[in-house]
Amino acid sequence: MLTLFVTAFMLGLLFNAAPGAVFAKTISEGAKGGFKPALAVQIGSLVGDALWAILGLLGIGLLLQLDVIRTPVAIAGIAYLLWLAWDNWQEAKTEFSVGEIDDNPLVKKALRDGMMLSLTNPQNIAYWAALGSAMGAVGVANPDVGDYGIFFAGFMVSSIVWCFFCAALVDQVFKRLGFGWAKLTYQACAVAFLYLAYASAQDLWQQTALVA
């Protein structure tokens, strides 16, 4: 039981620490508003992570890999990444004082963005569909509801720990930087979102070509 929890905890850290759209959005929000908006992105992403985790561990994740479901999710994700790229590039043109703005509107927007990025990420579907059908790889030959519950708990605990660690790290880094660096960060995040959209579109095209 403890081994399963620790394994899920470590897998959760690897899953959350991997660079991607959520991490880029955390940086862009933290560069402007500090700890709270950065944390809001991370917490928002947990909503999607939790949903995909539950569906994957229940085995429903395999059904979500069907093209009729996976393709619309992928298209929505690509469109949202493109919008974030444009939004971050526009934000880079707006002058502001780092950490000295009203963070309430930022927190709400960051929470929504984190949720959308996670819910429209087709990689989450594949990740949890694979784990949901491969519990034997972590030492459980015939998993029951209790095993799934322990695995899910381990993953979510590590995700919550990562949320606070990542947000605090971003806050401490950008607290010492001025608008010039924040502007460059927004531009870099815009480029990152654009690249992620391109990579997602390329992956979707390849998947469609294989099916055809």
Image: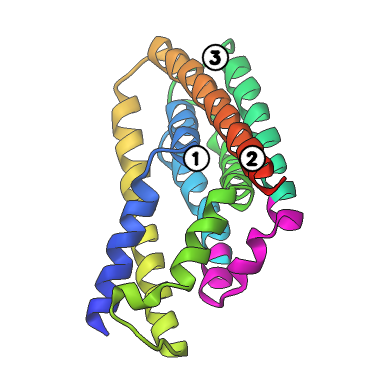
CB atoms at circles 1 and 2 under 8 Å apart? no
Front residue (pair 56, 90): 56
Crowding near pointer 3: few (<14 within 10 Å), some, many (20+)?
Answer: many
Identify residue type, mark 2. Leu
Decide: is 41 above or below 162: above
Magenta region, main secondary structure: helix
Image quarter in which the C terminus is found: top right
How many angstroms separate mark 3 from mark 1 (CA)?
Answer: 17 Å
Kindly identify which residue carries mark 3.
92
Mark 3, mark 1: which one is toward the viewer?
A: 3
Q: Quadrant of residue 174?
A: top left
Circle 2 SS class: helix
C-alpha gap between disc 1 and disc 2:
31 Å
x and y percentages locating residue 170 in the rendered image: 35, 35
Q: Which residue is mark 2?
A: 204
Q: Secondary structure at mark 1?
A: helix
Please, is residue 96 above or below residue 14 in the view?
above
> Dot 1, crowdedness within 10 Å: few (<14), some or many (≥20)?
many
Q: Which mark is residue 37?
A: 1
Region of the chain picked out in magenta, as a range: 52-70
The N terminus - image quarter: bottom left
Task: Tell me which numbered mark, 1 or 2, is placed earlier along the sequence.
Answer: 1
Quick check: 127 left or right of 114? left
**Mark 3: amino acid:** Ala
Residue sitting nearer the eye, 52 or 24: 52
The answer to whether residue 161 of the structure is visible from this angle is: no
Pick the residue in front: 61 or 22: 61
The amino acid beneath tag 1 is Pro
